[in-house]
Amino acid sequence: MALRLNEIAPDFTADTTQGTIHFHEWLGNGWGVLFSHPKDFTPVCTTELGYMAKLEPEFTKRNCKIIGLSVDPVESHLKWEKDIEETQGYPIKYPMIGDPNLTIAKLFDMLPADESGTSEGRTAANNQTVRSIFVIGPDKKIKLMLTYPMTTGRNFDEILRVIDSMQLTSSHKVATPANWKNGEDVIIVTSVSDQDAKEIFPDGWKTVKPYLRIVPQPDK
């Protein structure tokens, strides 16, 4: 069955570069980002893993854990991590899931459930759909899903931006406009009447259209 937004993220137990984890238990009460890779020692993924290592403190500030997955064994990941640090300049401090039996790739609908075999003998092209990002909220529900082609490196600054938006909008009756960045004006959601908005936003707002009301970003 295909995964959908606001469904509970699949739970699993897996070996990682930092030992065995139980996914929901590992997530705890915070946010999480799971990002996957079709094969170890691939060039684009090498740059992505290194950049995520650089950004990890920014995710930590947002109470968000990060975890990688690649369709190869943990032993291979540990060797790859040395290349990543050497070429990208940042050590991998977050766990990397080993998925040689394709179990988690199938569980997250990145490969067909009836896909046969293991990682042995498979190429990145065989696994090209295993290039997804899942953002998971404290309620263990999937908040965002993105899948990239193999030749296009992922924009993880955008993932931080989206998390900022989701964390803000989960606690305030606002939405964020196109290309919004943290600290910029936001939109009052349409489910809030003008009468209720007067209480929620006593300093007022700018009405562009009755359905488009702009207000300064409230404090998180």
Image (cartoon, rainbow, N blue to C red):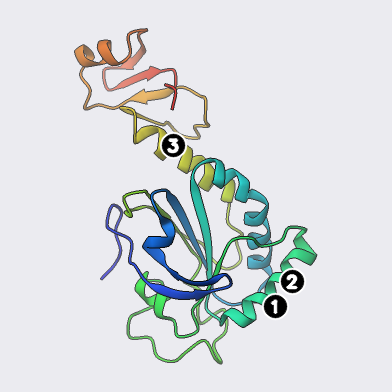
Task: Find residue 197 and report its horizontal and vertical position in percent.
Answer: 26, 15
**Looking at the picture, does residue 129 appear above or below residue 61?**
below
Residue to which mark 3 is pinned: 165
- As drawn, 143 above or below 13: above
Q: Give the total number of marks visible in the rendering.
A: 3
Indicate the position of residue 99 as horizontal and vertical percent values: 49, 79
Secondary structure beneath label 3: helix
SS at mark 1 in the image: helix
Q: Which numbered tag is attached to residue 153? A: none
Instruction: Check contact, mark 1 vs mark 2: CB within 8 A.
Output: yes
Residue 41 visible here:
no
Which residue does the image show at 41% across and 33% down from the upper left? Answer: 168
Please name the residue that numbered disc 2 is placed on. 82
Q: CA distance from mark 1 to mark 2?
A: 6 Å
**Nearest to N terminus: mark 3 or mark 2:** 2
Q: CA distance from mark 3 to mark 2?
A: 34 Å
Q: Is residue 193 left or right of residue 159?
A: left
**Are the residues at dot 1 and dot 3 in contact (C-beta closer than 8 Å)?**
no
- Residue at 78% over, 58% down: 89
Please, is residue 144 above or below residue 163 in the view? below
At 51% from the left and 82% from the top, the residue drawn is: 126
Viewer-side label of 3, 2: 2
Label 2: few (<14), some (14–19) or many (≥20) C-alpha neighbours in 10 Å:
some
Q: Which amino acid, by three-letter code, is at mark 3?
A: Ser
Residue type indicated by callout 1: Lys
Q: Nearer the viewer, mark 1 or mark 3?
A: 1
Read off the residue under disc 1. 79
**Foreground of the two, 6 or 90:** 90
Classify the position of the N terminus by image quarter: bottom left
